[in-house]
Image (cartoon, rainbow, N blue to C red):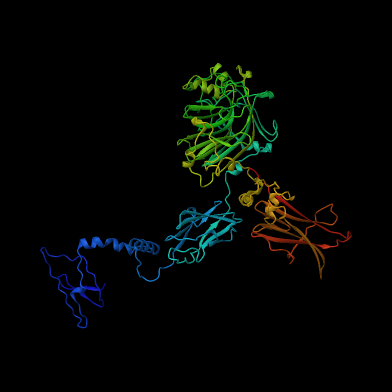
Amino acid sequence: MNLLPSGNYPYYRLIGWFTVRIEGVELNAGESNTIEVVNQQPYITIGLDEITVSTADHLAQAQPHRQVLGLSEMERANLLAFLRELDGSPVDNGPLPPPVVTVSLPPEAQGSGSSSHARLRFIVEFNRPITGFAADDLTISGSALPQAFQLIEFNPGQSYRVDVTGMLQTGQVSLQVQAAAAADGNGIFTATSPVAVVAWSPFIDDLAPLSDEFESPATLSNWSRVNEVEGWNADQLAQWDIGTSSPGNMRMMPHTSTYYMNLRAPLVYKEITGDFVATVRVDVRRRNGQPGRPVSAYSFGGLMVRAPQVTMAAAPNPGAPAGTRLNWPPDTYSSDWEPNNEDNLLISLGSPFSWQNPDASQWTIMAAQTDNGYTVNYWSPTGVPSGESIVTLQIVRIGSTFLLLRRHGNGEWIVEQRYVRADMPATLQVGMMSVTDYESILNNNLFSGQNGWETAYHHNRNIINAANGFTVNPDLVMDVDYFRVSRPAEDLTAAMLQSASLTSAGAGVQYLSGTGLAQFIGMTADQPYLTHLAGGAMAFKNFTTNLGAASDPLADPDGDGQTNFAEWALGGTNPTDANDTPAIVYTTYTDEDGSWLVLSHARLIGGVANASIYENAGAVYEVLGSGDLSGWAMEPEATTNPASLSAPAVGYEWMSFRMPLPQSGTGQGFLRFRLTDAPVPMP
């Protein structure tokens, strides 16, 4: 606007414009006001019909129309479509523009433009309803080599979600909607969408390495003990080892002890921060091979989650002989243990008091939680097979919600109990607990009600056995087959855990199947950690999952003599198709330098080579040479790939090595290929 003020009056002179808007003119009180229009440009004629006067009320009414000017292109198109629909008759504003389609990045990539989740999510939106949109209208590509995707409609005809999975390597994933992918009700087709690009790197589950299959006694040192960390100086486990007492298991055999109120018992654990899914498979039995469940009251073993305490030196200082009863609070000694700080929850298998379950063959599930030293127990034989001492137990944490599950043999997963504990800290102790012989604890006056702090301290700092002057009857031994822990699936929420029906609610056994949670927890989360695959664990799991194969690297589902690991590493052949087998190709040729034997193999792209050894994602490829088959010290040289080789699969490449033929003095030569895994030491 080019207006120049003139004098002391509300007078404006227009220069070089034919349309002007003047706001904020003050009018005199009364029924009428005079506006004088002076035209100083004789070749322009201004008529009264060309002057519009609007009051403040008029401007307020016009405000919504002004807001239209601030709409985006898609918002204006949506508004016009809506107005045409209300009008009910066509408006000749020329041909409608094509439906606008946009592709947005997944929420986790907003701002950063990258993701390390196992699944990438894109949102596809159309500005008006369309038909005919399908999965084949998408172009998904990128250097991360995505292998699969799923198109999900959540607002029919307008909003879609695209989940991309199976990325084989670090890189980018891009998505674009092709031209003419869909049409609106007027038969107008969409144009090509902009390209959405996300950087992707393999998701490495930071918790998975904490898992233990108990195959090596060396992993015993990876576990922490409450009695050691808190300085109680009292080992309440009569036996504790890996593979010595029971091959392939962790053996826990407790002295008389229990977790109840302020009483502390054996717990071997690993610290976990944040959300998790922890699973153990335990065999809880009587000692000395006797049949049936333990006869000692409250003999249980299972999975526990516990809040760490600040206790560093609970044992009395100066020390006192075992069995010496010390009063609480201390007067002649020091201890930094404080009662009413115990916070834990657990799920276990075992035996309560005989009067609570008189059937000696019937095992019982017990769940319990302790809050500031106050414990509430729940036990039930509901759905527990008679005489079966083996159970798989699982605890899932999402925020302050904990869901407890169990599984007997190869049966279905049972949702047992749920606790909501906002008081639990981010970092918890997660591991295996075992308790036995609560009756002897009572008989030895080691628990005297809720405020029995003196007797609780006496219990916690002592090995309660006959050698220390106690009359006891412990009767439980537990073997742990494995401990597996992982991060929950990113789509699992606390609300979903809170919606599950519970067996503990008294309405009978409540199974996990059919709840929608089975895709996140239960058997889905109970998988061994592939330690030897390291950074390639997720890529390997995606490979087997996408092809419907078991995730065991040593399995051979199609019986072709090649393991899942070999089929993944050597070209990505199908482990469920016996006709699709990894190939090690031998060829010979002669050139001006002599005769050559060549070995060619497929390998994953993006690894590190050191002479004839190549490593990528935990797979180690090695080509060895020999002149007599008795030694393999000859190192072959890399060479160009033979032209006869077929094109490698996406994400793979051919590599070839050669050695001269014949070998001097032998008249023969040999090449051997070796595929191994790179062991990853447990932390």
Image quarter (top left, top right, bottom left or bottom right) of the N terminus: bottom left
Q: Position of residue 201 (x, y in %)?
A: 57, 54
- Residue 527 visible from this viewpoint: yes
Q: Position of residue 21 (x, y in %)?
A: 24, 70
Q: Residue furthest front?
A: 89
Drawn side of residue 305 relative to residue 62, left or right = right
Q: Residue at x 84, y 63 (%)?
A: 661
Drawn side of residue 558 relative to residue 361, left or right = right
Note whether 283 is above or below 213 in the view shown.
above
Q: Residue furthest right?
A: 665
Q: Residue furthest left?
A: 30
Note whether 111 is above or below 680 in the view shown.
below
Q: Closer to the camera, 673 or 196?
A: 196
- Residue 342 visible from this viewpoint: no
Q: Closer to the camera, 545 or 513?
A: 513
Image quarter (top left, top right, bottom left or bottom right) of the C terminus: top right
Q: Position of residue 323 (x, y in %)?
A: 58, 19
Drawn side of residue 593 relative to residue 265, left or right = right
Q: Position of residue 334 (x, y in %)?
A: 51, 25
Q: How many marks?
A: 0
